[in-house]
Amino acid sequence: MPIMNNRQSNIKRIRKQFSLHKFPNLKINIEGFLISLILLGIPLNLYKNRFYDDSWTVGEWLISYAGGFIRRGLPGQIIFYLSTHLNINPIFFTWLISVFSIVFLFILIKIFCWDNFQKSFLLSSLVLLGPISEDYLVRKDVFLVLIYGTCLLTIRQLYLKKMSIFLSILLINIFSVIALLSHEAYGIWAIPSLFLLVFFYVKKNVIKTARAIFLSFVFIFPSVYSFICCIIFKGNQSIAIAIHDSWREFKDIMPSTELLDSVYPDGAIAWIGENLNSTFKLSISSLSKFNLFIFWHPLMWAITIFFAIRLFSGLKQDPYFNLKKIFILIQLIPFIPLFIIAHDYGRWIFIWSSSSCLLFSFAITTFKKESINLESKARRIKSLDKLFPVIKNQRNYNIVILLLGLPHCCWSLGRYLISNPIGFSIKNFIFYTSLILNKV
């Protein structure tokens, strides 16, 4: 009997060693797989968005002040100036900003979030892989999240007393004004949390709450004013045509299949002349849309948000598992107006999840004691566990990561399959194989 017990214990020990050896390898492979998709996907995005005719990606960067001051026009005006004086293809600058943004966002997430979230989540379609797998890397979303993270980094330096309040407020406003003049949506989802963080700092030194609110508003006023200007100067059709005409000067150096020869613009430049009712109607129309007569669009987006919250929370052993659920739900509130007025739901979910990672990491590192206390209180809310049940283990968590797709706009089964890591890996294989075969 002792011999049998020894043999059984040895077998159990060997199985345990094998499982522990296998588990890290599985984790490393998934992270390496996602990183390789990001690296391979960047050239794929640039190749797909190399013409002026790519009017929703390249075109978004080329909105300028050719017809007067207008929302989203700052980057396009800078690109126009540089292209004019350097005689360089304007699309090159859209590529440069986009690649710069994703690289530095990765660095920022590595600094801020790497130890606070599952690494596979940070590399997934909900965060870093999302814009790449769904072909909106060459848009302003990553750039805006990067600026938001830079503002959080600046505020952190203020809280740590490594930067004066004057310099930090100045930098926050400079960064935020750049973001707002690039895309006014930043004012809806980013400015509220930045205002609150400034308020919390001011409140530490000012007794009266009303006075602290007033001072915080004064500090953040340049950003608020820029947001209001973007709402007022929303654009019209004549300005859109003027912007389009200005880019026709670069016909010799900017590739286009036919759009530069057209009298009227298309895509993002054309849409700058549309009013809010047009975008609202598109969003409302999504309520009645089905794909393949089965997949109801609102339900599919709701399921995506459901899994995003569960993945954001991590596994049960996460020290802030419960607090993360509350945090991500609160962070969803400022995004509700975007869901109502515009139908690019996948892009909003990407910005929501990635900016929430940065903000949460800032919060628990800056307010560590308060975060621990809040986590203990959050554990008492049992309804959260029922609404968003825990993913049982690392294996199941990684399976969800591999299968979760995030279409950038209109949900469809095809877009879902292509946007998840497995489908996107097949897309990469087809792209690079065809590229090699065509060269041969």
Image (cartoon, rainbow, N blue to C red):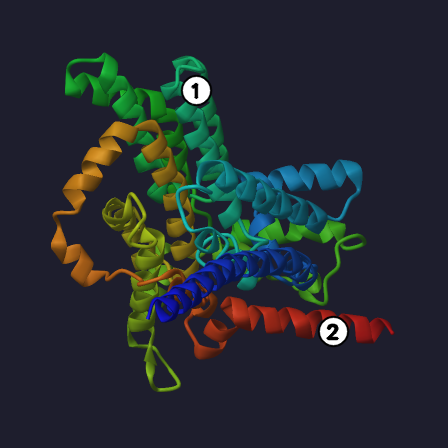
Can residue 29 be seen in this snapshot? yes
Q: Position of residue 111 (x, y in %)?
A: 50, 36
* Residue 408 seen by the camera: no
Give the tally of numbered discs: 2
Residue pointed to by mark 1: 168
Crowding around mark 2 (Cα neighbors within 10 Å: few <14, some 14 to 19, many 20+) is few
In the structure shown, which secondary structural element does the residue marked by tag 2 occupy?
helix
Q: Residue furthest bottom?
A: 293
Q: Nearer the viewer, residue 236 or 166?
A: 166
Tag shown at residue 16: none
Q: Quadrant of residue 137?
A: bottom right
Residue at the (40%, 19%) spot, across then down: 158
Amino acid at circle 1: Ser
Identify which residue, 400 or 83, lies in the foreground: 400
Does 369 sit left or right of 70 as displayed? left
Residue at image coords 15%, 41%: 377
- Is 15 rendered above or below residue 113? below
Residue 173 in the image: above or below residue 313: above
Q: Earlier in the sequence, mark 1 or mark 2?
A: 1
Tell me where residue 163 appears, x and y as whole percent. Answer: 45, 15
Image x and y of residue 264, in percent: 60, 62
For label 2, the residue is 433
Q: Is residue 54 above or below residue 213?
A: below
Report, in whole angstroms, how far the alpha carbon at label 1 lies from the one at label 2. Answer: 49 Å
130 to the left or right of 264:
left
Task: Tell me the amino acid under the disc marked 2.
Answer: Thr
Q: Nearer the viewer, residue 94 or 99?
A: 99
Q: Nearer the viewer, residue 309 or 369?
A: 369
Label 1: how many residues lie within 10 Å, few (<14), some (14-19) or many (20+)?
A: many
